Image: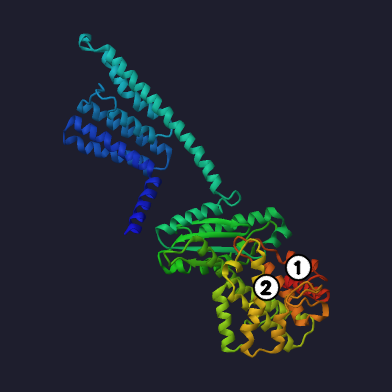
Amino acid sequence: MTQISNNILTRLSSFYKKYMSEIIYISILVVTSILTLLEVKKISLVFLQILFIAIMIFAKIITKKKSSRRILSLFAFSLYACIAHMYGLDYSFDLSINKWSFLTAAFIILDEGYLISILVGFYPAARLLMMLFHPNPSIINVGKIIGVANGQISFTITAVITYHLFRKLLGQRNLYLNLSNTDPLTGLANLSHTIDSAKKMLREGNISLLLTDMDRFKQINDTYGHMAGNKVLIDVSQFILKETEGLDRIVGRLGGDEFIIVVKNDGSKKILDLGEKLMNSLKNKYFSIDPDIDPITLSFSVGQANSTDADIDIEKLMHKADVNMFYNKYKNHRSNMLVDKHKPSLSKEGSELLNVLAEKDMYTYIHSAYTAQYAAALGKELGFSNDKVEILFTAGWLHDVGKVLISNDIIRKSSSLTDDEYGLIKKHVSYGINILHDLSLPEEVMTCIKYHHEHWDGSGYPKKLSQKNIPPEARVLQIADSYSAMIIKRVYRNVLTPEEALEEIKKNSGKQFDPEYVNAFESLVRGISKAV
């Protein structure tokens, strides 16, 4: 019940903030009409007052053109002036706050300029001053007339100046607020504002959160320059806005070439299939990089997560969407890794173990898939037999299964690990060997997994083996494992481009990695990049 009440209050508050100006404006018109009707108390005036309010509302809320708005403003004022003349409305201002004060305020809000507001405010003062020319001066209180007229003129000038100064200050505030909430390049919401808006939307009901990432964007910057890259980012952001138009959503820039979309989830198929639809639309869209070059298609990955649990928070949703995005990325691009197989030939227990790994941490699962593909491809590059390539492929998939016994808080930690945490992470190898012991795997697979953290210079673990004492398959797996870990993206964590990751591998040649295998891996990766 409390949750429902909070939702109602939140929605009422949002409604008021969104339509505050219109609510105040209509309230002023209603008060003006009530004061007028209380003074005259004639049924015939009701129709004219309703007509007056209708014209004023139409002018403020529906009419968009300034010229049309001013024409309607003048017409509405003329109508009220006629009402004042026909029914002999009082100009004496017995009350300091009266119908003329409210009328002036209404026209100040309606008119973006000064002329009509001043005309409306000065009108009752002018009518009062005309009384000074009454044929029988003895019945006129000259001092009061001049004082009241002067008060109305002063009120009008003060109200007009105050309102327009307030509007200017509010405009500047909104401008600075908008700049603080907006990505300067694309004009989309920045990450901070998007997250705040998403939290607010989540409090009001279910949402869908989508992440989209442009593949190989660095190649565009490197090939065509950063100006062309910026143009692509702007074009992509506008395309996403157009594709999600009509939905109750906010679109933001996550950073770099990644975007985030948060949309209210009404449970419709349109929302649930939004991620797939967006990915297909982006895939088929041609983007112009340079006027002298034909438009090209770009490769994107999209992930979607839907809130169904009342206790879920934005961070968990982002993690789910991020995992989904990189799983889709893996599905879309595994064909580029030179190995056609998707999963190794395992027993039922082995397949279930991989499912457990996926449930435990999808990143580790995807990382294992990449590692298997690169290890098998490097084995082929080195001329290993088909049996050994199969061993590398299987070992790549299973090398991190020991992490199912390690806390996700440690596995997903974005900051540096403590010594104790690193010690626990190192145990994943022995944990994995114990888990795999009953799967009747080939001894070569077990050996490969057991020693894939040994270093060429003897500084690795668990046995501090060095150089050729490390089994060849383990030396291959170590390169594939390290490279995959460097190129897998995660939210809140910077990663390396394939070229940067390759440079890191080369930098550690002769220290962590077998120099001969590094050379072969460089040829492999450059060949894949060229093919892609």
In the rendered structure, the answer to whether residue 137 lies left or right of residue 74 reads left
Of the two numbered discs 2 and 1 in the rendering, the one whose residue sits closer to the viewer: 2
How many C-alpha atoms fall within 10 Å of the one at disc 2: few (<14), some, or many (≥20)? some
Furthest residue toward left:
42
Of callouts 2 and 1, the N-terminal one = 2
Q: Is residue 111 above or below residue 440?
A: above
How many C-alpha atoms fall within 10 Å of the one at disc 1: few (<14), some, or many (≥20)? many
In the rendered structure, the answer to whether residue 136 lies left or right of residue 236 reads left
Quarter of the image where one finds residue 102: top left
Q: Is residue 310 visible?
A: yes
At 45% from the left edge and 35% from the top edge, which residue is drawn? 167
**Element carrying mark 2:** helix
Quickly name the residue at label 2: 426
Furthest residue toward top:
138
Quarter of the image where one finds residue 123: top left
Give, as a three-letter code, the residue at label 1. Leu
**Element carrying mark 1:** helix
Residue 471: % across, % down: 77, 82
Q: Is residue 334 visible?
A: no
In the rendered structure, the answer to whether residue 146 lies left or right of residue 468 reads left
Q: Split into 4 quadrants, where in the image is the N terminus? A: bottom left
| Image marks 2 and 1: residues in contact by CB distance under 8 Å | no
Quickly name the residue at label 1: 502
Q: Is residue 156 above or below residue 246?
A: above
Residue 468: % across, % down: 83, 80
Decide which of 258, 133 is in the foreground and name it: 258
Decide which of 38, 84 is in the foreground and name it: 38
Residue 219: % across, % down: 71, 62
Quarter of the image where one finds residue 49: top left
Give, as a three-letter code, the residue at label 2. Lys
**Distance from Cα at disc 2 to Cα at disc 1:** 24 Å
